Amino acid sequence: MKGVEAAVETLFAEGGALSSGKSGYSRRSQQVELARSVARTISDKAILLADAPTGTGKSLAYLAPAALSGEKIVVSTATIALQHQLLNEDIPPLRKAVRKQLGYPEDEGFSYAVMKGRRNFLCTQRYHETLRMGSIFDTGAIRDLDRWASETETGDREDLDFPLPAQTWSEVASDGEDCAPAACPFREGCFYYAHRDKAMEADVIVVNHALLLANAASGGAIFDVSDRHLIVDEAHRLEDVMSQAFGARASFGRVRYAMRQAKKKSEGAAEAADGATMAAELFFGDLDQKSGRLGEESAAPRGYRNLLEALASVKASLKSDPKEEANNLAFMVGRLGSNLESFYREPEETHAYSIIAGRSRVANRNPHPELRSWLVDTDVAFREVVLPTFENRGLVLTSATLANGGKPDSDGGDGSAFSYARSRLGLGRRDAVAFPSLSKNGRAKTVSKKVDESLGEETFDYAGRCLLYVEDEIPEPARGGYERFTEECIRRCRELVSASGGRALILLSTNRALRAFKENFDVPYPVKFQNDDSPGRLVSWLKNSGDGILVGTRTFWEGIDVPGEAVSLVVIDRVPFPPPDDPVVEKLCQKAGKGWFSEVSLPRGQIALRQGAGRLMRRSDDRGVIALLDSRVNRKGWGKLVIRSFPYAPVTTSLSDVETFFGEGSGGSRSSGVAK
């Protein structure tokens, strides 16, 4: 792989193939160093934890060595925005540059594709069944879908040219638990299988975290990864997606959906399916989000036992049906019953359980509550489910905020800025991790992989182009004092945006604070609030408004890219520690005991804070102020650790320093009210 490292240096060099092929490109030593680390990881079939601050150019840094090595890759992302960036902005110029450097003809070079889950594609058989059975479609939707189904070449929901509600789409979308390919008359023209087979031919496949984890849990049954290395971008999100993927959900909407499918597949299941729907209506109608108890059957709402028995009856009818498509659906119904039962028996220590507000609406009534569980011990799942899938390949985990603040060996930690990520992914504190696998003869064995770290340096001049303002006067956001805290935040924000001339992104921690801002934040600049429009259109508005202000909650803490002067001020109301009543956080804190704050809350707060602050500097010539209105940072022992979550920049507690910074137009105050 030394040859690949040398090829990386050549590709990223000033005047190299990438420089001449990608608009605005300039060599960055941080990007080249990360690319070399990725090349070594692929060669050694090791694991790499890479923190790549904004501006590093991490996408090209991990794609380039993969392309130059000729190896096959799976890239997993958490957001659609990053998928679009990879497919439309990063990969095409890289492919052209690699082809030029290696001397390939115009029609050669590495290939790439996005792979989506089944539910993104029209199932022709289910569509025809739905029409025959009488459906929830109105006449206009039937006409539009009929036309689209006859014209589409992809069957991809993203290509729909008319609005179709999610609930309606679910009736005709492909579903792995309701698929019998051998018996399907439409198998030859199946949109999903055509998409999957085409994507599998590509050298670089782009997927999302949910599909990656579903494939790992199935042992690679969804798509084959045996010859592919894995790169996980936005890896700081992997824990949360894993927690949901290995949990369970039971809702009225899910029961109703499964029973409709059962009636379509098997006449013998129709009566039991109607009974299950009626029992589900009773059960979920009585489910109380505030006072419901879990963990014992005696606490279950009315209809629980009847619902379980009806689901078992539907499952039996489907299994005894001679049609394969009915047999396949029995698994879905059986799993639904098992999931429901898991909430009313002795809970597993590895999971957190809760009754949450529902999303499925019925006949204009409020949505029924839902039952949800989340995997708490993601370390075991990653080590024992994900790692074995890529046993003989390299694995890169990267993000702009994968490290949880500070530097290695600082503050008496375990010597790793990746301590939290290592803990949650089961990678331990050593330079290698052992995990279980199976040998060719099916016997259990233990495999060991080398674990490396790459803590990237900041690429932007925060010291010269940024000022960090930390509030010192506003009362702490203590329990019972949130209303006063929010009032003072609104007052301070008026002063801050006056200094910046608008051009601000205000990030709040709660919807309650958002409502208060919407009612009381009156300033002489155009202002828009979260939910005034779609997130994408709000961001576009902010980019083009000149002096606009966007106020939002966690939707806008990450994934927002507004370079230039449009965002010259980022205000964060308080350190975004996870809510203590979050079921997963509550369980993690219980397990951590006295160390719950430093082991759970602080690292999560640090990572979220870095994401929010990262909205300011998006290009090397950006300039501005990050304002944190949480005065606890100046008074609590953990305050210094929070400050170290930010890139190194001068820190002040003086509003006049902020005014001077914006008044100067260059440079900035060096006053330091808080030690950095």
Image (cartoon, rainbow, N blue to C red):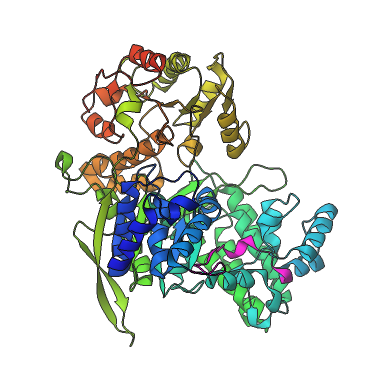
Image position of 125 with respect to 371: above or below: below
Image position of 612 with respect to 521: above or below: below
Q: How far from the left and from the top, in percent, is residue 40?
A: 29, 64
Q: Is 127 part of what is drawn in magenta? A: no
Q: How far from the left and from the top, in percent, is residue 118?
A: 60, 65
Q: Main secondary structure of the magenta part?
A: loop
Q: Is 105 part of what is drawn in magenta? A: yes
- Tell which of 532 and 475 is nearer to you: 532
- Tell which of 520 and 642 is nearer to you: 642
- In the shown orientation, is residue 416 left or right of residue 319? left
Hey, which quadrant is residue 9 in on the image?
bottom left
Which stretch appears magenta? Answer: 104-125
Q: Residue at x 56, y 35 (%)?
A: 539
- In the shown orientation, is residue 27 left or right of residue 516? left
Q: Residue at x 41, y 70 (%)?
A: 70
Q: Residue at x 47, y 14 (%)?
A: 498
Outermost residue, bottom side: 441
Q: How far from the left and from the top, in percent, is residue 55?
A: 39, 42
- Could you tell me which quadrant the C terminus lies in? top left
- Tell which of 192 and 107 is nearer to you: 107
